Amino acid sequence: MSEKHFVYILLTENNTFYCGYTDNVEKRFQMHLQGKGAKYTKANKPVKIVWQKEFQTKSEALKEEYRIKHTLTREQKLELINSV
């Protein structure tokens, strides 16, 4: 069985986005809801998964996570989310 690699974006209660990497989006989302996922989502409660994409390799996924987190504006993130 090959490993799966996902990048995802969550919408938070205060209308911000959180982007992350995981091998299981639903399990990771549940961790975020329990306040165990990340420092950011502990302080900014997630509401729903608004975008996710599967990648062939962990390296590809982590590069995309970095690109989304560090180079995209909020408007560009909205475009990405709405392009699905």
Image: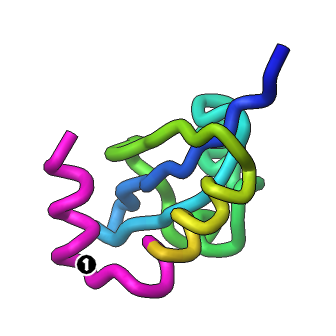
Q: Spot the residue most to the top.
A: 1
Q: In the figure, is residue 29 to the left or right of 18? A: right
Q: Position of residue 11 (x, y in %)?
A: 36, 56
Q: Which residue is found at the position 62% from the left and 54% from the top?
A: 61
Q: Does the magenta stretch include residue 12?
A: no
Q: Position of residue 46 (x, y in %)?
A: 47, 54
Q: In the figure, is residue 47 to the left or right of 44? A: left
Q: Where is residue 33 in the image (x, y as percent from the top left)?
A: 60, 45
Could you tell me the amino acid type at mark 1? Arg
Q: Which residue is found at the position 43% from the left and 53% from the top?
A: 10
Residue carrying label 1 = 74
Q: In the figure, is residue 81 to the left or right of 10? A: left
Q: Is residue 73 magenta?
A: yes
Q: Which residue is found at the position 36% from the left and 45% from the top?
A: 51
Q: Where is residue 49 in the image (x, y as percent from the top left)?
A: 41, 42
| Quadrant placement of the N terminus | top right
- Give the quadrant of residue 41: bottom right
Residue range (magenta) = 68-84
Nearer the observer, 69 or 44 = 69
Nearer the observer, 68 or 12 = 68
Q: Which residue is found at the position 57% from the left and 74% from the top?
A: 66
In this picture, is 20 found above or below 22? below
In this picture, is 16 found above or below 3? below
What secondary structure is found at the residue carrying circle 1?
A: helix
Total numbered labels placed on residues in the image: 1
Q: Spot the residue most to the right.
A: 1
